[in-house]
Amino acid sequence: MTQILIYSNTQILYILTMIGKLRGIIDSIEEDSLLIDVGGVGYQVFCSGNTLRKIPGRGEAVSLAIETHVREDHIHLYGFLEKIELEWFRILTTVQGVGNRVALAILSSLNPEQLMSAIAAQDKSAFKAVSGVGPKLSERIITELKTKVKSFASQPIVITPGKGKQPAPAPHEAVSALVNLGYNRAEAYTVIAKIANQNSDMEVAELIRAGLKELGR
């Protein structure tokens, strides 16, 4: 964790420790946040609907990656179960007009895979149900972030092979096959990466069949 000093009129008001992760017991769950008890100290953490739907219940242990936002009048913590959701939260807030709350609203309606697919397909209708996102903002999100989707889709698919085995090239070949069949690369990448991590021994043909089945839902 990194310490920062906050000054006012050349006087140090207080020292704040930037929080990058919290592990504790869920004290309570609200509509857009939860209270985590960490050693007797309660931290209010704002979360997306997707994260809140996945966390365990009250009284259970939870571990969240944290994005700390400091302003003159408040300190807000934003929590994420998955690193990719945290990454997309940060990416979304680089778009003009997308603040922290709007980014969480987007990630409540669309998980990272769905968000990448919507951007890659330039599907503005995917954002219709998101509070605070109108046609102009959805178009700006798609325009400004399409290169980000390409960079995610071009990353190697990392799978955990069985003991004593080497990762096979099958996932990359399956993605290429789906792209040749007309599916966009970002969508094919996310689907095949998910399947390959669940079944690391699948051959190319099996991955393609499973990918087509998943994409056809």
Image (cartoon, rainbow, N blue to C red):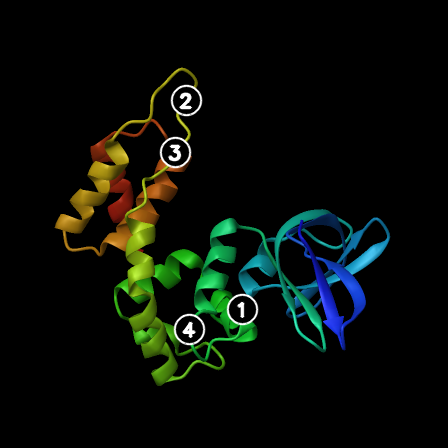
In x, y percent, where is residue 46?
A: 64, 66
Q: Secondary structure at mark 1?
A: helix
Give the farthest residue toward the right: 40
Task: Give the mark nearest the N terminus, 1 or 4.
Answer: 4
Residue mark closest to the camera, 1 vs 4: 4
Q: Badge 3: how crowded within 10 Å, few (<14), some, or many (20+)?
A: some
The alpha-carbon separation of the residues under discs 1 and 2 comes to 36 Å
The alpha-carbon separation of the residues under discs 3 and 1 comes to 28 Å
The residue indicated by pointer 1 is: 104
The residue indicated by pointer 2 is: 162
Q: Badge 2: how crowded within 10 Å, few (<14), some, or many (20+)?
A: few
Q: Is residue 165 above or below residue 150?
A: above
Tell which of 30 and 65 is nearer to you: 65
Q: Is residue 89 above or below residue 195?
A: below
Q: Badge 1: how crowded within 10 Å, few (<14), some, or many (20+)?
A: many
Residue mark closest to the camera, 4 vs 2: 4
Q: Is residue 198 visible?
A: yes
Task: Give the mark nearest the N terminus, 3 or 1.
Answer: 1
Disc 4 vs disc 2: Cβ atoms closer than 8 Å? no
Give the farthest residue toward the front: 10
Q: Secondary structure at mark 4?
A: loop
Q: Amino acid at mark 4?
A: Val
Q: Amino acid at mark 2?
A: Gly
Left or right, 142 with respect to 69, comes to left
Q: Secondary structure at mark 2?
A: loop
Residue mark closest to the camera, 1 vs 2: 1
Tell which of 180 and 139 is nearer to you: 139
The residue indicated by pointer 3 is: 159
Give the farthest residue toward the left: 180
The alpha-carbon separation of the residues under discs 4 and 2 comes to 41 Å
The residue indicated by pointer 4 is: 95
Instruction: Examine the image and state in which quarter residue 139 appears.
Output: bottom left
